[in-house]
């Protein structure tokens, strides 16, 4: 009996390929036994990959790169063989605050937005799901593009995705940028309004990737490839809009996500944007480089680091992919 | 050494304070309910933070240096990078640590070892409790199945048990699983 591979996920809509691969027997079809571990936060995922308590995980691409670069504690040997998803994050503002903002928040409205922000006695507190998340980097990029200094005009804090709506409802944060379904949940409960989707900040941006613990992948090349194959097959199924109700039901059962809300961000949904799965699978070094350059822009990454080399060390599309 | 302890499990936190303050040089501060970890770090300026990994705001510590200019401390995650076995044990036990002051890893290690040992003991107790609950439930299930078999098939108690065991062996299932199907069949009638 082969030992199960431990695959970490968070309670998010873009974990769909993982739970679908399990329920459709796609892991079994590839001959790999997978134990899904649902973790409470990204730091848990990154720590457990680093210290051998997980073999693989679905995680934001920049977090995988940052962990490999040693930006959060000791450098982690990680391999990213494929992308999992594109798009699907929402920038959300509390319902009470949204009435104060100029609408729509187009570049033309930027001066009014800046003026409003600088009028605040205390910078509004906005949550992202991890320092090195796609969410933080895309939010900061967007803020920069409308002339807002994310470090001076706002207070950016870190809250795990499954907690952001509760914090917003309690009034402890003014807004957040988090993955689906949490933006739609905030709207459904009336606590927040979605301002924009992350794909409008950076079209077709890579969101989650599959990350493998480097030592594990080196010792288990077969299961590593089988895992990628199974997830790619699952991605193709997740892209079919007619499957979305069943996927939502599965996410409800397996990850306790609200079944009536998750379809909004799935293919065919009526949310602000829909997640693309299969299109995310082929790795694009330019995408990794973009996130690394943004990290350098915010001075989290020194100018002495060779960014191309960092991406090349982590991206391993030479695993036998379909 | 100033230790900030962030553990919402009040029982465990109490034991931890007792264990950690056995070290005369250790001063232990606990976060108050509802207090955000980043705020507590800013207020108390500890040398090390010991945190329950399931605590939702522990992620906030990772980027303290980058995220907030209000907090000048260097934040380095994990005290002992050269001891992977110890770190693995800590992660498995559900505790992590952040070095936010000037104390060296060597000074911190005994304190962290105590914390990890306590977390592990707690975790084991929880697992044992859960196992005991399952065993109790299974015993109850088998008793109910036996009662059904005694009533419907006029078995004696040993006969009912033997029947369950035979079914289990021939179908490759566990006795409680066979008992469950007997109880469910009865309920669906």
Image (cartoon, coloured by chain):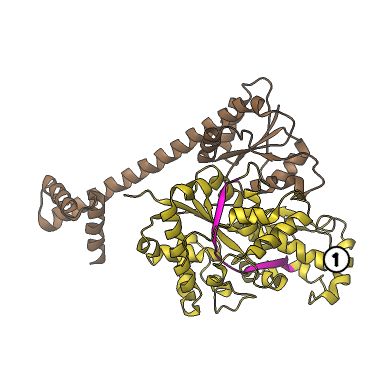
Chain colours: A yellow, B brown
**Residue B189 in sight:** yes
As drawn, B21 above or below A50:
above
Using a 10 Å C-alpha cutoff, classify the residue at mark 1 as few (fewer than 14 neighbours), some (14 to 19) or many (20 or more).
some
What's the magenta region?
A76-95
**Residue A253 in sight:** no
Which residue is rendered at x = 75% and y = 44% of the image? B39
- Judged by its main secondary structure, the magenta piece is strand
Q: Nearer the viewer, residue A202 or A122?
A: A202
Where residue A283 sits in the image (x, y, percent)? 58, 64
Where residue B98 sits in the image (x, y, percent)? 66, 38
Where residue B100 sits in the image (x, y, percent)? 72, 36
Q: Nearer the viewer, residue A10 or B28?
A: A10
Which residue extends farthest top? B24
Number of marks present in the image shown: 1
Q: Is residue A46 magenta?
A: no
Q: Is residue A91 magenta?
A: yes
Badge 1 marks a residue whose secondary structure is loop
Quadrant in the picture for residue B105 = top right
The C terminus of chain B sits in image quarter: bottom left
Read off the chain for label 1: A
Q: Which residue is mark 1?
A: A147
As drawn, A62 above or below B80:
below
As drawn, A240 above or below A113:
below
Which residue is rendered at x = 55% and y = 53% of the image? A79
Where residue A38 sits in the image (x, y, percent)? 50, 54
Left/right placement of residue A2 relative to residue B88 reads left
The N terminus of chain B sits in image quarter: top right
């Amino acid at each position: 009996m082969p030992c199960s591979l431990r695959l970490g996920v968070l309670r998010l809509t873009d974990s769909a390929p993982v739970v679908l691969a399990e329920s459709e027997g796609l892991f079994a079809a590839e001959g790999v036994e997978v134990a899904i571990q649902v973790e409470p936060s990204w730091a848990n995922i990154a720590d457990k990959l680093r210290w051998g308590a997980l073999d693989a995980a679905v995680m934001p691409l920049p977090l995988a790169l940052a962990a490999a670069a040693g930006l959060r504690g000791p450098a982690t040997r990680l391999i990213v063989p494929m992308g999992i998803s594109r798009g699907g994050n929402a920038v959300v503002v509390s319902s009470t605050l949204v009435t104060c903002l100029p609408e729509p928040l187009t570049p033309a409205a930027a001066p009014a937005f800046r003026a409003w922000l600088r009028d605040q006695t205390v910078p509004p507190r906005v949550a992202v799901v991890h320092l090195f998340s796609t969410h933080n980097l895309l939010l900061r990029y967007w803020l920069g593009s409308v002339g807002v200094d994310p470090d001076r005009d706002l207070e950016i804090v870190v809250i795990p995705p499954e907690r952001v709506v509760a914090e917003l409802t309690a009034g402890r944060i003014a807004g957040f940028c988090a993955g689906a379904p949490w933006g739609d949940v905030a709207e459904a409960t009336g606590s927040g309004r979605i301002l924009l989707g992350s794909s409008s900040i950076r079209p077709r941006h890579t969101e989650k990737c599959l990350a493998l613990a480097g030592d594990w992948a080196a010792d288990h090349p077969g299961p590593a490839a089988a895992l990628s194959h199974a997830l790619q097959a699952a991605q193709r199924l997740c892209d079919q809009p007619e499957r979305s109700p069943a996927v939502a039901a599965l996410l409800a059962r397996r990850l306790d996500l609200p079944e009536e809300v998750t379809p909004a961000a799935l293919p065919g949904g009526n949310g602000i944007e829909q997640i693309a799965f299969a299109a995310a699978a082929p790795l694009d070094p330019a995408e990794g480089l973009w996130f690394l350059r943004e990290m350098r822009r915010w001075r989290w990454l020194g100018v002495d680091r060779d960014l191309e080399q960092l991406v090349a060390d982590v991206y391993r599309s030479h695993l036998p992919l379909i | 050494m100033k230790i900030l302890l962030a553990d919402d499990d009040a029982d465990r936190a109490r034991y931890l304070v007792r264990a950690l303050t056995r070290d005369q040089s250790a001063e232990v501060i606990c976060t108050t309910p509802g207090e955000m970890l980043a705020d507590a770090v800013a207020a108390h300026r500890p040398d090390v933070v010991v945190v329950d990994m399931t605590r939702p705001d522990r992620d906030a510590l990772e980027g303290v240096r980058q995220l907030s200019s209000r907090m000048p401390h260097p934040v380095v995650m994990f005290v002992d990078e050269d001891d992977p076995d110890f770190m693995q044990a800590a992660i498995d036990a559900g505790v992590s640590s952040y070095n936010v002051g000037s104390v060296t890893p060597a000074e911190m290690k005994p304190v962290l070892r105590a914390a990890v040992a306590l977390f592990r003991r707690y975790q084991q107790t929880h697992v044992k409790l859960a196992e005991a609950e399952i065993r109790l439930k299974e015993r109850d299930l088998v008793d109910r199945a036996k009662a059904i078999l005694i009533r419907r098939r006029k078995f004696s108690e040993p006969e009912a048990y033997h029947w369950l065991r035979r079914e289990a062996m021939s179908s490759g299932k566990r006795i409680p699983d066979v008992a469950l199907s007997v109880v469910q069949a009865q309920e669906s009638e």
